[in-house]
Amino acid sequence: HSSPPAMSLAMATPTATAAAHLASPLLFSSSPDPRSRRTLRAPFRRARLAVVASVPDPADKPVEYTPWLIAGLGNPGSKYHGTRHNVGFEMVDRIARDEGITMNTIQSKSLLGVGLIGEVPVLLIKPQSYMNYCGEAIGPLAAYYQVPLRHILVIYDDMSLPNGVLRLQRKGGHGRHNGLQNVIEHLDGCREFPRLSIGIGSPPGKMDTRAFLLQKFSSEERIQIDTALEQGVDAVRTLVLKGFSGSIERFNLVQKYKFNRA
């Protein structure tokens, strides 16, 4: 893949517009003085940034500041909007809305937006290369922006979970999900990246799996998904700001049993 055109991931206040983020070459700086700005080519460890760090383990030493790449999986085009297979796209849209991030740039086969969660910069991505080839978009972007595996969050639909149930994991396999499998292939076969799976239930009876995935939710299922999206935004915010803390473990436990009735 050819290198994507440079874009800005500049440090800015939470109220800065997406246009300001995208106005100049990729920069990381805690100072408004252009002479003090550092490009992405400088290793993150050399940057001196007065920002909140995302630490994977509270017991570890404070780590250098690192941005997040958050990718939702789905298919582009209006005919796929609202289908089960596109809930990854919906989650990214909800994060963008709640965090005030504008998704208005095309780069490396992706629709993307740059902004902040708290003071941590994030790159929101909706691959436009269709589900089975979404790794072709995510892999090059992760390499270009030098985002480590532990800060690549992939959001996707999961037939192994009941509709509307979420699960946030540090790593894992692809679970026969073609999109996730393609992402792993384009991350050099590495599986050690976080993922947020959104339960969509399983096909009833002998219904064709593809037909089920490309079907829209029933009104009752839609309510459960909308609630899950709200809860997912909070979980992603917690992950970005605090890493995999005890609150994430509690989140997974609550999700697992949220539809169980005594």
Image (tube, rainbow, N blue to C red):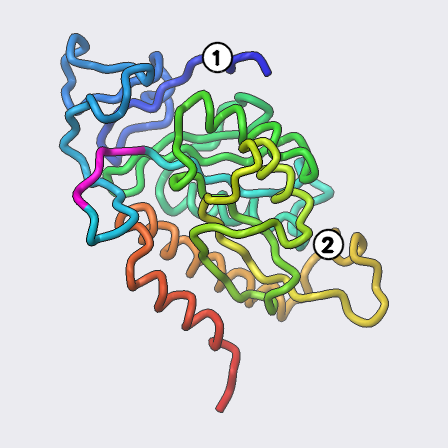
Q: On the image, numbered disc 1 is attached to which residue?
A: 5
Residue 182's x, y, as percent? Answer: 64, 37
Examine the image and state in which quarter residue 41 appears: top left
Residue 115's x, y, as percent? Answer: 35, 33
Examine the image and state in which quarter residue 253 appears: bottom left
Between 107 and 39, the one lying in front of the other is 39
Q: Amino acid at mark 2?
A: Leu
Compared to 200, does 40 lie above or below? above
> Residue at point 30% right, 50% down?
243
Between 147 and 85, the one lying in front of the other is 147
> Residue at point 56% right, 44% down?
89
Q: Is 190 left or right of 10, judged from the image as shown? A: right
Residue 217's x, y, as percent? Answer: 67, 61
Q: Is 64 left or right of 67, judged from the image as shown? A: left
Q: Which residues make up the magenta segment?
A: 61-66
Residue 125, magenta (yes or no) = no
Q: Amino acid at mark 1?
A: Pro
Q: On the image, numbered disc 2 is attached to which residue?
A: 213
How crowded pointer 2 is (Cα within 10 Å; few <14, some 14-19, many 20+) is rated as many
* Quadrant (top left/top right/bottom left/bottom right) for the N terminus: top right
In the rendered structure, find residue 127 and report the number of the disc placed on it. Answer: none
How crowded pointer 1 is (Cα within 10 Å; few <14, some 14-19, many 20+) is rated as few
Q: CA distance from mark 1 to mark 2?
A: 34 Å
Residue 209's x, y, as percent? Answer: 79, 57
